[in-house]
Image (cartoon, helix red, strand yellow):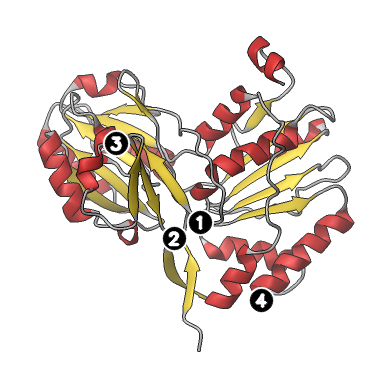
Amino acid sequence: MAQKTSKLLGFTRKRFDENLGLGLDAPFSQHSKQSTGSSYISGSFFAGARDFRVQGGEFYHIEKQYVTLGQNVDSAQAASDILICPVPSQYFVGRKDILSQLSRVFSAPVATLYCAKKEELQNFIKHHMKWCNPITLDATSATALEKTFAEEVKNSQSIFLDTVLVLENTDPSVTIQDYLPGWLYVPILITSTSQNISNKAFSVNFQLFDSANQKEIKELAEEIKKVLQPQQHIVTLVASGGTGKTQVVLKFVSENSFRFSNVWFFDATSDTTLVDNFRQLGRAAGVGEQVEDVKNFLVRSHQNWLCIFDNADEISLKSYIPICNHGNVIVTSRLKESEQLASPGGNMNFGDIDRNNAIDF
């Protein structure tokens, strides 16, 4: 009997800038179906690790992660081999502005939490992070972070969908990027008793005041949860035909497919083509061939999948997009109404091209 497993999530790679802190995900060329990521980090840190290689100062990891979810291997593989995303045109260049925006939207969230008292931070993590599976690392020094990471996060199998990496008592002078491997795609909460931790360009900065009452602490905990908990991302690229919407998406996927458990490319030019694509995916996954069957499959999977709905110029996609707290969707369309599908901050302004991108394009 086939072993019941299913891919959990892909991995991302962070490019870090010493002056900015955690930055955008760096571009990466991928020429095969293997999940491969890289990151600018110290090669000596993982010198004894398996399935890694260091090239040109960059750190590469080649691995796929699996977890028991009740889907057999044959069905999971068949689903991965259907609706494969095309490769971008070799002549396509430019639109780095949109590629950067896509990288930002699909990056794992990072937040900082400052409090003057170490004990208050520890109590906050203990009592108000029960919604997730926190992995706490000592970041008081580079040596401590290196040691605890090796002890607590031995490999990708240590990471689950509800994992949050908590860097405890972080020294702002520690270059955190040197101690995070390329395969690490997980929300990160960086705590510190130094206010300087908030000076770095992280996504969101929080502060726990000494005088905070229980109501204020609970409100803070909810805000942090909103930032770090898994959520669905829906991005829309709306513009007239021939502006390169599809090619930008294909370029992004070719450089970042390792972030996602699966990437499925739907032909959304009509209801007929879209329903047929859903039927193909449902048949391959063994879940039924109706649109609702496939939507329910995506909702139940709890994976970091990506569905691309291309050229949705004449139909409404509202009834085709699964609504859940995970997964990712990209829509290309000429319809202005499609922008209403986007998550907050998920509508890409594709109309204006800066001078450099215009020259490239």
Q: Which residue is mark 3?
A: 41
* Rendered view: 161 above or below 107: below
Q: Which residue is mark 4?
A: 286
* Rendered view: 230 above or below 351: below
Q: CA distance from mark 4 to mark 3?
A: 41 Å
Q: Which residue is mark 2?
A: 64
Given this view, does label 1 or label 4 mark the residue nearer the observer? 1
Q: Which residue is nearer to you in this view: 295 or 68?
A: 68
117 relative to 53 in the view: left or right: left
Given this view, does label 2 or label 4 mark the residue nearer the observer? 2
Residue farthest bottom in this picture: 1
Which amino acid does the dot numbered 2 rest on? Lys
Whole-percent x, y for residue 251 in the image: 63, 37
Q: Earlier in the sequence, mark 1 or mark 4?
A: 1
Which amino acid does the dot numbered 1 rest on? Gln
Residue 131 visible in the snapshot: no
Q: Which residue is mark 1?
A: 34
145 relative to 24 in the view: left or right: left
